[in-house]
Amino acid sequence: MRTRTLATFGSSGSPQFRTYSAQGVTGDQLAETMDLAVLEGDVADVRGNTVALSRIAAGTLGVALGDSIDLRLGDGTPIKPTVVALYERGLGLGDVTLPHDLVLEHTTDRLDLAVLVTAAVGTDAAALGDALRSAVRHLPTVQVSNRGSFIAAQSAAAAGESAVGLILNAVLLGYLAIAVVNTLVMATASRFREFALLQLVGATRRQVFAMMRSETRIIVVAAVLIGTLGAIPSLVGTSIGLTRTLIPSIPPLVYLGIVAVTALLGSAAIMISTRIAMRSQPITAIGVRE
């Protein structure tokens, strides 16, 4: 059972609010099917008016084991459960874990998202899957999935929730790219008298373009190195805060894509503006005031 909760924290004069993804579970059976990496307390105690929180959520809300928190469930119902467990794996499994029956009563459709089943060691996975499909054959909306399919479905749902954030970041990066390209174009185009002087003292157009290509490579490499080194401290800090690991998770394809776009924009901005700046004859351009 999945839902969203709204947590209220801080002083009564200036309250703060934070939304969290939540799950409703059967606490006394949870350890058999899901490993939350419990740090304090016991998830088996999640029943009645209790809650288990991720380490990150507990730190944000400023609560510890045995404290009570102010929550609003998906339908707006206020509750004040007691924290009975703290766990590490909130990023993948939800920051708030509530009793199953409590969550079920305050959802619109009152339907369970999933029933997790564990098998004894040595059980044939294919045979177990066939047995489960046979057991739910009379329920057309129920699907039997393995662990990989279930995790993929959860990841897809999480990706959908973060789509708005990705769009906003893309817009901000687009404005940043426009500003950088505009700066490079103006800086390069303003050197038209320099290009004319180089040609008048004996340099060919090909040599001037070769010089600008070398400058472009230096600028692009410097931008990639400085950008990477500048991002590392914040990424390491975020990784330590969220996952307690020193090495952040950086998708290689995403990083290479950023580098490729950076190189493409930088090269195009400099070389195209160089070609435009060299359209005029050198003798004409050298006499033009900047």
Image (tube, rainbow, N blue to C red):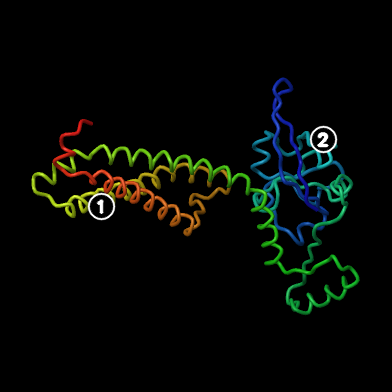
Quadrant in the rendering for residue 201: top left
Q: How many marks?
A: 2
Residue at 32% in and 50% down: 221
Callout 1 amino acid: Arg
The kind of secondary structure element at disc 1 is: helix
Callout 2 amino acid: Lys
Question: Residue 45: x, y in percent?
Answer: 81, 48
Above or below for 132 versus 36:
below
Front residue (pair 15, 211):
211
Q: Which mark is residue 213?
A: 1
Left or right, 210 with respect to 52, comes to left
Question: Residue 270: x, y in percent?
Answer: 31, 47
Q: Residue furthest top?
A: 13
Question: Residue 180: x, y in percent?
Answer: 39, 40
Ranked by sequence position, the earlier of labels 2 and 1 is 2
Tell me the residue that label 2 is attached to: 80
Q: Residues within 10 Å of mark 2 (few under 14, many from 20)?
A: some
Q: Residues within 10 Å of mark 1 (few under 14, many from 20)?
A: some
